[in-house]
Image: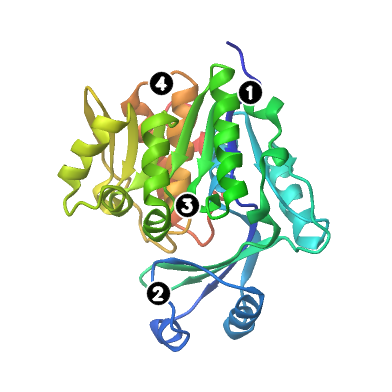
């Protein structure tokens, strides 16, 4: 069946505030290095002031992924919730500027657009402090069903899963996609996110998700197992396809019939790991929705991840299509 979009992203619409700091800042502010922590308005403002100089750009995990798909030359759309404020305007403009169709949910007058404060330490680890704002109030009524039905793959962000209305919006979007004959994918997002929603995520993987994305730590957390090998055996029972990144070790594409290992692309210097998993998913999904084999899909993912970790920020600075051999 033909589709207007290769990938439709569904997640928290956030503006990223990215700053460099040393480990003393992490300790002084009692941050959990390498994690994502939800914060309230006061905490978000405190961290913003404490960091000083920062780069601000629209972000959000699934939004980063669909921007990556567009950078490869794919057709992408995004569903997320922003308010009628300056950051909401910036978010929508940034998506449209790279060719992603934005289908915003209904705004809420008393709730500002969300933002994520990202602290990057000298070892390139990112520590995220997220104020979700209006983005977390996604409900089934915010889902543009026509957009979901017109995407080959629906890509859902685990970070969005904290409120009951958002959970139902997830399931509603998945039902719409499957009813239209489309595939549904889920990214686990963060091991702390998996800890909060393990039972729900397991149920989604078993019943509604066709493609699972995550990293090695998240997969082990999902099944509460100590070794990657054991977690691979578990996901092969529950999912027909899983795409698991492993940092410098590359990635593994796991199906019930095979495991395809993908080498990481070489990078002269890793400056910021923010968005590495998001962009690996972008490359994989671009390849997958355009008929490439799994090894090629993984190779495209590795190319995209290597580009994004070579600079500060979660989105590519060059057109990813120009990095593909033979293009």
**Front in this rendered view, residue 173 or 7:** 173
| Distance between mark 3 and mark 2 Cα atoms | 23 Å
Marks 3 and 4, Cα distance to the nearest angstrom? Answer: 22 Å
Relative placement, left or right, of 217 versus 280 is: left
The residues tagged by marks 3 and 1 sit, at their Cα atoms, a distance apart of 30 Å
Tag shown at residue 149: 1
Residue 319 sits above or below residue 29 on the image: above
In the rendered view, does 98 fall on the left or right side of 74? right
Looking at marks 2 and 4 on the same chain, the residue that comes earlier in the sequence is marked by 2
Marks 4 and 1, how far apart at CA: 22 Å
Q: Position of residue 248 (x, y in %)?
A: 27, 53
Where does label 4 land, which residue?
292
| Helix, strand or loop status at disc 2 | loop
Residue pictured at 75% horizontal, 60% vertical: 87
Callout 1: helix, strand or loop?
A: helix
Residue identified by numbered label 2? 32
Residue that appears at 55% across and 45% down: 167
Name the mark nearer the viewer: 2 or 4: 2
Residue 62 in which image quadrant: top right
Q: Earlier in the sequence, mark 3 or mark 2?
A: 2
**Where is mark 3, residue-wise?**
308
Query: How far apart in space, not on screen, are marks 2 and 1 (Cα)?
Result: 39 Å
Could you say where residue 307 lies in the image, as x and y percent from the top left? 45, 49
Q: Residues within 10 Å of mark 4 (few under 14, many from 20)?
A: some
Which mark sits nearer the N-terminus, 2 or 1?
2
Q: Nearer the viewer, mark 3 or mark 1?
A: 1
């Amino acid at each position: 069946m033909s589709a207007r979009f290769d990938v439709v992203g569904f997640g928290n619409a956030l503006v990223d505030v990215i700053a460099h700091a040393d480990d003393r800042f992490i300790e002084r502010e009692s941050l959990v290095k390498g994690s994502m922590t939800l914060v309230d308005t006061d905490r978000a403002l405190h961290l913003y002031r404490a960091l000083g100089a920062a780069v601000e750009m629209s972000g959000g995990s699934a939004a980063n992924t669909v921007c990556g798909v567009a950078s490869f030359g794919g057709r992408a759309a995004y569903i997320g919730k922003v308010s009628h404020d300056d950051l909401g305007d910036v978010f929508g403009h940034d998506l449209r500027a790279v060719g992603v169709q934005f289908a915003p949910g209904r705004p809420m007058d008393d709730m500002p657009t969300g933002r994520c404060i990202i602290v990057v330490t000298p070892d390139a680890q990112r520590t995220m402090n997220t104020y979700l704002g209006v983005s977390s109030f996604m409900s089934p009524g915010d889902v543009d069903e026509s957009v979901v039905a017109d995407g080959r793959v629906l890509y859902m962000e685990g970070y969005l899963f904290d409120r009951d209305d958002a959970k139902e919006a997830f399931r509603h979007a998945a039902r719409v996609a499957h009813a239209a004959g489309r595939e549904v994918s889920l990214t686990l997002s963060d091991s702390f996110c998996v800890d909060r929603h393990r039972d729900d995520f397991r149920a989604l993987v078993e019943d509604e998700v066709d493609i699972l994305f995550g990293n090695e730590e998240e997969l082990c957390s999902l099944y509460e197992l100590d070794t990657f090998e054991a977690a691979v055996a578990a996901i092969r029972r529950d999912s027909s396809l899983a795409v698991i990144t492993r940092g410098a070790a590359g990635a593994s594409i796991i199906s019930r019939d095979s495991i395809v290992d993908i080498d990481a692309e070489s990078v002269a210097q890793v400056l910021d790991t923010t968005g590495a998993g998001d962009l690996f998913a972008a490359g994989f999904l671009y390849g997958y929705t355009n008929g490439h084999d799994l090894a090629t899909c993984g190779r495209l993912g590795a190319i995209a991840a290597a580009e994004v970790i070579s600079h500060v920020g979660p989105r590519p600075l060059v057109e990813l299509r120009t990095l593909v051999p033979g293009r």
